[in-house]
Amino acid sequence: MNKSSTIEKLYHEALSVLQELIKVPSLSRQEDKTAVILEKYFSDKNIPVERVKNNLYAKNKNFAEGKKTILLNSHHDTVPPNKNYTNDPFRPLIKDDKLFGLGCNDAGAPLVSLLAAFLYFYEKEIPVNIIFAASAEEEVSGKDGTELLLTHLPKINMGIVGEPTQMKMAIAEKGLLVLDCEASGKAGHAARDEGENAIYKAIKDIQWLEEFSFEKKSKWLGSVHKAVTSIETENKAHNVVPSSCRFVVDVRVNDLYSFEEILDILKSKMKSKINPRSMRLKPSFISENHPLVKSGKALGMEVFGSPTCSDMALMDFPAVKCGPGNSARSHTADEFVYLHEIKEGISLYVDWLEKLFEN
């Protein structure tokens, strides 16, 4: 079978697998049923597959020590269905070259396209090792997803993370720093000039945050972005001045700052107490001179910096985020992916890996 016929066959298999995945709810931390579907798919092909909780991985047939290893990774969990769905989110519907269904675009299409590329090379003699991994809990940045999976894998030299990027290569990605902040005051009766209103103190810090800009601007990721996303007090009585006011800040960090630097700057300027929820999802960057990037560019693939965070943030090796589909459709009602995007994604993944093997 020639290359184009093989890719056509793999495309139809990939589409069938994706339709089966859509039928089964797989919200983050509840991916056990889609893990079973993928596990059975490998078993039916007599390909050994390992499962770590709801994560799965498989190695190419000729995996050998001494070769560099590339990881092909995407996730099979989804967010809950958008409340404005008009289609059944768990019914794969094909209409006008579009496949509709929850998770079809993010990240079902990248997942099955990487799976098809893995299968294309599975039995071939190639100069590198390939590991395909379907991970869990990506949408909630859970610790039992890629973070857990990576502890069970051999040394990885480079990776492709499947997300809907229109097959453009994200060579940089902003990190995510979520801050729980608390302004403290003193309770008092609202009818009298008593106490210290914690809301007013919080507002001063929030106003400063709105006006402040971090100096360093990245070539690929631009400026550090920050947004206050919620504010509350425990006080429910209308006549009590609150002694505490909490607010949350979402900070998207470029590759020119460490999380520690961001925190030092904010703590030096704000009166509120600041507590980071996590320091795990750091900004990432891969050199344009890396063979993975150069191979893609040789095929005409575009490069960009991504403002959104993925499992690439958890990887301590060079990686690129790239896949069929469009990020703008992620988490939307009546999510869809074009069928031709899947087919073209498989073909480009295969060409990309072949070009990489030449370097």
Image (tube, rainbow, N blue to C red):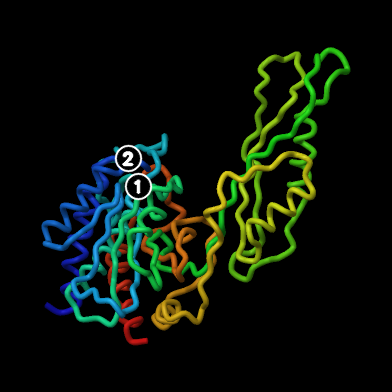
Query: Is 141 placed above or below 298 here?
Result: above
Residue picked out by circle 2 = 30
Residue 227 versus residue 91: which sits nearer the camera? Answer: 227
User: Which corner quadrant of the image does residue 7 belong to?
Assistant: bottom left
Query: Does residue 260 appear left or right of residue 47 in this picture?
Result: right
Q: Is residue 261 above or below residue 31?
A: below
Quadrant housing residue 203: top right
Instruction: Name the kind of residue labelled 1 in the image.
Output: Asp
Pinpoint residue 344: horizontal percent, then vertical percent: 30, 69
- Evaluate if marks 2 and 1 touch, with contact meaning CB atoms under 8 Å apart: yes
Name the spot of residue 253 as percent of width and height, x first: 62, 57
Q: Where is residue 48 drawn, in percent x and y?
A: 17, 61
What is the spatial separation of the Cα atoms under label 2 and label 1, in whole angstroms?
8 Å
- Residue 71: image quadrant is bottom left
**Mark 1, secondary structure of its residue:** loop
| Local SS, label 2 | loop
Which residue: 67% across, 33% down?
Answer: 246
Residue 186 is left or right of residue 323, and the answer is right
Which residue is disc 1 drawn over? 77
For the C terminus, the quadrant is bottom left
x and y percentages locating residue 211 in the rendered image: 77, 49
- Using the image as rendered, state which of residue 152 and residue 247 is in the foreground: 152
Q: Amino acid at mark 2?
A: Gln
Q: Residue, x 49% and y 59% (percent of image)?
A: 313
Quarter of the image that includes the N terminus = bottom left
The mark lying in front, picked from 2 and 1, is 2
Q: Is residue 161 left or right of residue 272?
A: left
